[in-house]
Image (cartoon, coloured by chain):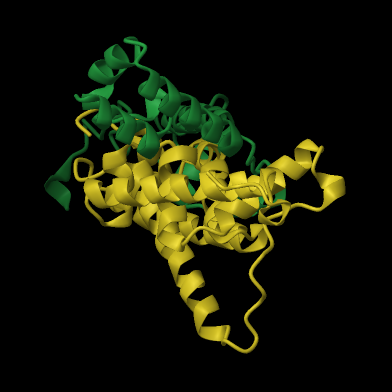
Chain colours: A green, B yellow
Amino acid sequence: MTHQQLVDLLETYGADPDHWPRESRVEAEALVQHGDPAIAGALRQALALDVELSRYSVGPADAELARRIVASGPSSPWWQRIGRRHRLWISGAVLAGAGMGGVAAGAIGISLVAPLPGVATSVIGGGEESGVDTAFGEVGMNWSEQ
Amino acid sequence: LNDIDPDLELLSGVSRGEPAAVREMVARKLPRLTALATRVLGDRAEANDVAQETFMQIWKHAGRWQPGSARFDTWIHRVALNLCNDRLRRRRDFVTMDDAPEPMDPTPAPDEQMESAGRSERIEDAVAALPARQRQALVLHYYQELSNIEAADVMNISVEALESLLSRARRQLRIQLADDRDPPLSGKDRR
């Protein structure tokens, strides 16, 4: 890099090496260290303009605008939203439901399997006439007559 | 450009409609977009509109974003700058020569000269007085801190063309700010 190229770089990109093209940075910084008066002058001039430019500040973004933009943003499908918001509630409900289902199934199963206490087997269609000996079938039924 | 795009993960969350990702995207990009549009347009209300319209495009394209071609941040700068250019064109269409405003006097009033607010206004006015393309190059590179390659990409020009715009912008600003310090009527020679 020549001195003139460095002066051009300073006039184009300013005095901050972070603003210089990456591929020129090392060479330019090394050249700046030489202390050439023309380069020092160009550096001072570029720095003075950078200082002026830095005075142009823009206030923070409007909070109400931010709120409106967030509200306009995409949202996930309803089942995912529900899942996120009520994950705990749903897992509790599922557990409770499963538990209640289990209890109900168990009760039905028992009601089918076990004879009701205090009820004669004849009342539920059992007994010697029908040949019901077990809960799983009329093992002793005689089908020959039907 | 070979670096990993720092916005990709966030963008992925936005595309899934995750509320936290949407909020983070707004927190991360709204100040940048507002600053860009404010300095390019010189009008905060219009800048807010541009920022909002840019986010509509972000929401629309988040799910279809293809990493690799350009950084997401560069892309939103291009979208916002295009929206700014639309508004600048509309201004030109509506403002005829008869009702065009007088060129802004860049010299601050005497009572403003010692105030830092006055200094801020002076540079604001000087940037606003630049030709649009020079102003855009300066804003993208200096204020938005895009690399020369990214800024040229956003403006759809070569790096050499960007450098020419930047160089002319800085020269013009130096002249204008020097004039502010040493008004021509004072009789002092310009540099």
| Residue A45 in picture, x, y percent from top left | 49, 31
Which residue occupies the foreground of this view, A37 or A127? A37
Q: In which quarter of the image is residue A142?
A: top left
Quadrant of the image for the N terminus of chain A? top left
Q: Where B131 falls versus A107 (above or below)?
A: below
Near-viewer residue (B152 or B20): B152
- What x and y, as percent, mark residue B159? 24, 46
Q: What is the count of numbered marks? A: 0
In the rendered view, tell whether residue B184 sits above or below residue A112: below
Q: Residue at x 48, y 33 (%)?
A: A101
The percent coordinates of residue B81 (x first, y second) are: 42, 58
Q: Can residue A66 be seen in this view?
A: no
Q: Is residue A43 left or right of residue B95?
A: left
* Of the pair B30 and B97, the residue shown nearer to us: B97
Does residue A116 sit above or below B77 in this rendering?
Answer: above
The residue located at (50%, 42%) in the rendering is B29
Residue at point 50%, 70% (across, down): B88
Residue B149: tell me if it is visible. yes
Q: Position of residue A117 (x, y in %)?
A: 55, 24
The extreme left residue here reads: A144
Q: In this view, does B189 lie above or below A15?
A: below
Q: Which of B87 and A102 is in front in this view?
A: B87
